[in-house]
Image (cartoon, rainbow, N blue to C red):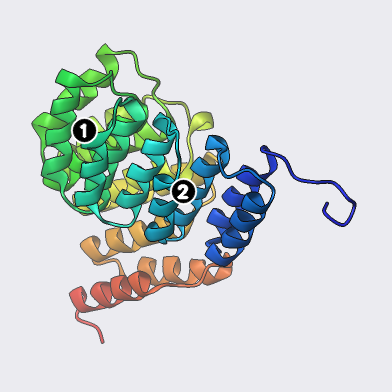
Amino acid sequence: MLRAGVFPDYLTYPFLAKASARLLKPELGGLIHGHALKNGFQLDKFINNSLIHMYASCHDIVYARRVFDEMPMKNIVSWNAMLDGYAKCGDMASARQVFDLMPQRDVVSWSCLIDGYVKNGDHKEALAIFEEMLVLGPKANEVTMVSVLCACAHLGALDQGRSMHCYVMDNGLPMTLVLRTSLVDMYAKCGAIEEALYVFRGVSNGKTDVLLWNAMIGGLAIHGLVNESLELFTEMQIAGIVPDEITYLCLLSACAHGGLVKEAWYFFECLGKHGMTPKSEHYACMVDVLARAGQK
């Protein structure tokens, strides 16, 4: 582009910054930043917001904060990018400080904070922030609810999880596949396997993905419903869903619970046959299968 004599504009740099973030290449992002400054775009909020996101995604929160502090005019996207950046880097104290200083907040602001606490293992605080959001903030969306359901799943908080499900239905939130998968995972981890199955069966096979099937197969496995787990895998194959590494991990877990050594070896070997490399979790599962069966 440059060799052709075509100069980038305010729309070009954000795409370049986004690409650098996906590649986790802060040095490339720094070059793009410098080029933008050289061409007089230091005051462009759209570009600066993308630079904050890029530096934070590359875990260079110092440069992200520098860009943020040097912005003479910030909008809510700028504040959300900085909040999300701190959360991504695990600095929830700074994330909360940014949140508290925000002149205004939207659903993205609340969702970023809640998700940050979930990702950093403070599930009780995530639920506390959600309760605060219900009183002070905007209506939660499906992205918010995915994080909240994850918190409920980790805490085994079935009653709260059911309340979140009711919130989704009462507020007419779109039942995306990610949200449905989160509900299945929450119910399964909280011991309500029938409710997990009910949510799972609430969508036709043509509108599912491997993540939803994994959640249900894994949920059946952890409850010792070995035959049901393996039968669901067969149903998954009939539906044309291609299994991934997580699918086979769930199946190996089911085999461990059921003492199915022969079947476990079959699924373990399927990984290689389908171009997947077994990871430490798969080997650990196989060791568990053999140990439970009394084999070495």
| Left or right, 244 with reference to 226 | right
- Residue 76 percent across, percent down from the top left: 39, 30
Q: In what element is the residue under mark 1?
A: helix
Mark identifier at residue 150: none
- Residue under circle 2? 52
Q: Marks 2 and 1, Cα distance to the nearest angstrom?
A: 44 Å
Question: Is residue 192 shown above or below 217?
Answer: above
Taking the view exactly as shown, the residue that stands out farthest to the bottom is 296
Q: Quadrant of the C terminus?
A: bottom left
Query: Mark 1: which amino acid?
Result: Glu
| Near-viewer residue (74 or 222) | 74
Mark identifier at residue 194: 1
- Dot in front, 2 or 1: 2
- Residue 272 percent across, percent down from the top left: 53, 71
- Residue 197 percent across, percent down from the top left: 28, 33
| Left or right, 51 with reference to 117 | right
Tell me if I can see residue 264 in this picture: yes
Q: Earlier in the sequence, mark 2 or mark 1?
A: 2
Query: Mark 2: which amino acid?
Result: Ile
Residue 147 sits in quarter: top left
Question: Is residue 295 shown above or below 73?
Answer: below
Residue under the point 12% across and 30% down: 160
Residue under the point 42% across and 28% down: 176
